[in-house]
Image (cartoon, rainbow, N blue to C red):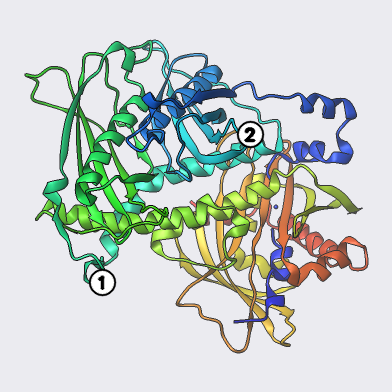
Amino acid sequence: SGAPAARGSHLALCSFPSLQSPAAAARSAPSEVEPRQRRAMEGYRNATEVQMSQMVVPFHTNYRGELSIGQLLKWIDTAACLSAERHAGCPCVTASVDDIYFEHTISVGQVVNIKAKVNRAFNSSLEVGVQVSYEDLCNGKQWNVCKAYATFVAQGKPPAKIKLKPLIPQTEEEKIEYSIAAERRRMRLAHKDTIKGLITNSPVQSEGENRECNTVVPAEKTRVESVELILPPHANHQGNTFGGQIMAWMENVATIAASRLCRGHPSLKTIEMFHFRGPSQVGDRLLFKAIVNNAFKNSMEVGVCVEAYGHEMEVSRRHINSAFMTFVVLNGDGQPCTLPVLKPEPGDGERRYKEASARKKIRLDRKYVISCKHTEVPLSVPWDQSNKVYLSYNNVSALKTLVAKANWVLASERDKVKMYMLEEDKFLSIRIEMTICIDAKQAFLLLSDMGRRHEWDEHYVGAELVQQVDKDDMIYHVISRTISEENKPQDFVILASRREPCSKGDPYVVAFRSVTLPTQPAQPEYTRGEILCSGVCIWQETEELTKVSYYNQATPGVLAYITTNIAGLSSSFHSTFQACERFLQKHKDDVSVRLQNL
């Protein structure tokens, strides 16, 4: 509901930001980069970057002559580990791997190209991004296979504790990955609770009644158990098993379990985010257990559990890892086949069956909201408990991506308020900056409270808090004074996500985007507007001075409004942010603001 012209509206404009530090952002503008610096960047290569190229030979393939995913995982882990160790300067072990979606299969004779580099270093852990492609040497064409994010932990000599040196991003791409790495880390930590919450609160419905295939396979028929002895070639120089080797063994038993259900040759499409819970060493035995948890119409989930023990007489076993893999079976035309119905085992089997349905929904949410570019996500994504973590991630990462852009151009400057513009693809974005004498956290607390927005922004009538998602995410129903083409005031349902700095030099962030809520349908007296990407970033420049930057990625509905301000034909932006400065100065010493946020 609401005319398309309402999308983006002034509400977003006067609210919200850039991600590198303001000083760095200014330095990165093309007009401010010296020719010598530009030439130096042309030959720049990330110091942590590791490249690996492997020719696929029959030894690496499965029964179809395609590269085994297990072998690919070993190469990915090796390249990522070498990149992590290049930055850390000491041995590193795999701690976790995010979701991996495999887009293409790779055949004998083709070349796999892997590029890995550290995105960000935290205290003792690092995030490494890995890009995998393959090329056909006969025609020179290349295709993307997958993108992976792996977390590694640096290991020093006991009892010394490792403190990693910070990574300083240089290029626009590196600044984006650096900023968003903090959001991915936050999402990993919340992953277990997200799964548990959905399983507890969501009813699960069986697809079996509507299945075209009438074959029913008992889950126990798909069970696989296999043991591996860890030998020196399977481990690093410290004797710890390579994470990639464990992943390859896991893929092997999972493929066998999937084959027992479909009586065919399944293809692995997705590996869900997982964590290594502890190390295993040379001489340990690893016990792998796999079973099909649930079979949907065209895909199945296989669960794999890995346990370690020291010798055959040892009773206690250490849980090393658990993972969930999604398989499909393709026909001769490359289309997915209908799978048999799975009959779960009583007790734990029924629990795994229900959990698989919940995980399927979460996988779709993650792929839909996170894996695609934020510009490909509909403006108003339906919000619910199961996707709240991923919508919050998308909200903040979209803003951080906008902040890290390098091609901002100064459009105007008036009374120390600077307006920048960025033309990119079909979007026109603005950034408005000002420096104020206020503590950065105080400014953050004041500007993240949309309930007080009307105190300084004349375009706001009010903002009602309709859902307190958690301490960092809130959903507001906002009413604006801006009149739409339908001659009605605009209203918005906005997800506000706020973040305190993850490391020194990071800004305080408040991000805004539109969502839809069943409890907040469009009302006839308003035109429902939508916000694509907007927000505010706040940096502590000195002990006394704070830089506040507002950002907005405008949609067509507000282009005329923005261009009028950029061209100097209107001063509404200037007056709004002057009012914002007065509001911040008035409340800069208000102790009650901090007390309310304890």
Q: Nearer the viewer, residue 390 or 341?
A: 341
Q: Amino acid at mark 1?
A: Asn
In the figure, 284 relative to 529: above or below? above
Q: Amino acid at mark 2?
A: Gly
In the figure, 523 relative to 445: above or below? below
- Give the residue displayed 33% in from the left and 48% down from the top: 327
Per the model, the C-alpha gap separating discs 1 and 2 is 45 Å
The disc label shown at residue 210, or none: 1
Discs 1, 2 touching: Cβ within 8 Å: no
As helix, strand or loop, the secondary structure at mark 1 comes to helix
Whichever of labels 1 and 2 marks the residue nearer the N terminus, that label is 2
- Give the residue displayed 79% in from the left and 50% down from the top: 434
In the rendering, at what x and y percent does residue 236 appear?
37, 14
In the rendering, at what x and y percent does residue 329 appear?
33, 51
Q: Nearer the viewer, residue 407 or 570?
A: 407
Q: Nearer the viewer, residue 411 or 21?
A: 411
Q: Quadrant of residue 43?
A: top right
The disc label shown at residue 140, or none: 2
In the figure, 157 relative to 327: above or below? above
- Give the residue displayed 31% in from the left and 36% down from the top: 251
Q: Is residue 123 left or right of residue 215?
A: right
Can residue 351 be seen by looking at this rendering? Answer: yes
